[in-house]
Structure formats: structure tokens, C-alpha cells
Amino acid sequence: MSNLFTRLKDTVVADFHEMLDQKEEKNPMIQLNEYVRQCEQQAKKIRALVEKQYLVKQEFSKEYNHAKVMLEKRTRQAELAAEAGEVELQEHAEQEKELYQERVDKLSALRDQSIKELEMLESKYEQMKYKIKELYVKRLELKGRENVAKAHQGMNRVLQSDLASKSISKFSDLENYIERLEEKVKSDYRMHTLDARLAELEKNKYTTT
């Protein structure tokens, strides 16, 4: 029994998703909206990656500047040790000077590479934002065209059907009904006036006699 209900549930869910898919296929605007949402989500992810790459460039610059400072420092110290005749200190300073020189060269190359990559990412990100803006404009254009087409379709449905002629007929019947009412009011008013005048005439006649 449990398996039966499970299969039944899966069948209902599958049919529901199929119905949604068919609905989306029939309405390209829904597909366009979904595509725009996906582009927006992708743009957010790319923006986050660009920001991370900017932080990477900053770290490379920080390490490069530190290594450069230490290289200059060990260079001065090696010169001072040589002038003072401190051979052992000079050797240690020279060794560290070479290490920092290698570090400076490596970090310089990595920093330059990160800068180029960041510039490339920012350029492509700007292109992506521009394309998304174009999608916004295109969606507005299509939405406007869809609204106009639906409006024309609705108006044509009214104008080309019997609804308009039936409406005119109804208005004509209503107008005739109102005219009959107006005529009856006028007739009743004339009759009331005539009765009043005749009654007044009879009253005057009997009074004089």
C-alpha cells in the first residue's frame, strides 16, 4: 500500500511539473524572465569573485611591499657590516638579501599577474552588466508589444463578435423604454391638467347658478 501511494504521489508530481513545463513553453515571456533571473544570479557570483580577486591583489601588494622594504633594509645592513669589517654579519645579511630579492621578484610577477586578471575580470563583468541591461530593455520592449497585442486582441474580439451589436440593441431597447416612460409622464400630466381644468369649470358653473 505504501509503495502504491508513493508511485501515485510521484505520478502526480511528474504530471504537475510537466504541466508547468508546457505552460512555460507556451509563454516565452516566462522563459525570458527566468533567463534574466539566472543572469542576475550569475552576475552576483561573478561580482563576488571579482571582489575576492581584488583582495588577492591587495595581499600580493602588501607582501611585495614588505619584502621590498626588507630587501632594502638587508642591503643597507650588508653594506654597513662590510664597512665595519663584520664579515659574519655581512654574510648573513647578504644571504637574507638574496632571499628577499627572490621573494620580491616572485611577488612582483604574481602581483602583476593578479592585476591583469583583475582588470580582465572587471572588463568582462562590465560587459556582462551591459548585456543584462540590454536584456532589461528587450524585456520591456517585448512586454510592451505583448500588452499592445493582447489589447488589440481583446478589442477585436469585442468588435468582431455579436457582443457589440447586441449591446447596441440593448441600448436601443432601453432608449425606447425611456421614451415610453417620458411619453406616459407627459400624458398623465396632460390628463391631470385637463381633469383639473374641467373640475374647476364645473365648480364655477354650479357656483354661479
Image (cartoon, rainbow, N blue to C red):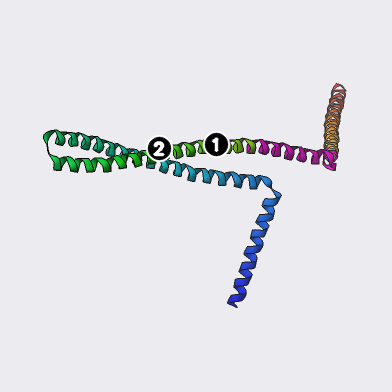
Kind of residue at disc 1: Gln
Q: Looking at the image, which is closer to me, 162 or 172?
A: 162
Q: Are marks 1 and 2 in contact (CB under 8 Å)?
A: no
Front position among marks 1 and 2: 2
Q: Looking at the image, which is closer to me, 61 or 166?
A: 61
Question: Would you call the spot at circle 1 few (<14 residues within 10 Å), some (14-19), or many (20 or more)?
Answer: few
Q: Position of residue 85 (x, y in %)?
A: 12, 36
Kind of residue at disc 2: Asp
The quadrant of the rendering that contains the N terminus is: bottom right
Which residue is identified by label 1? 127
Q: Looking at the image, which is closer to me, 78 or 152?
A: 78
**Where on the picture, by quarter, is residue 7?**
bottom right
The quadrant of the rendering that contains the C terminus is: top right
Q: Position of residue 69 (x, y in %)?
A: 25, 36
- Position of 71 with respect to 181 (left or right) is left
Of marks 1 and 2, which one's residue comes earlier in the chain?
A: 2
> Mostly what secondary structure, the magenta segment?
helix
Seen at 60% across and 76% down, the residue is 3
Question: Would you call the spot at circle 2 few (<14 residues within 10 Å), some (14-19), or many (20 or more)?
Answer: some
Q: Which residues are magenta?
A: 139-167
Tell me, yes or no, if residue 57 can be seen here: no
- Position of 76 with respect to 181 (left or right) is left
As drawn, the residue found furthest toward the bottom would be 1
Q: Secondary structure at mark 1?
A: helix
Which residue is identified by label 2? 112
How far apart marks 1 and 2 lie (CA) works out to 23 Å
Residue 162 among those drawn in magenta: yes
Q: Looking at the image, which is closer to me, 74 or 131?
A: 74
**Where on the picture, by quarter, is residue 63?**
top left
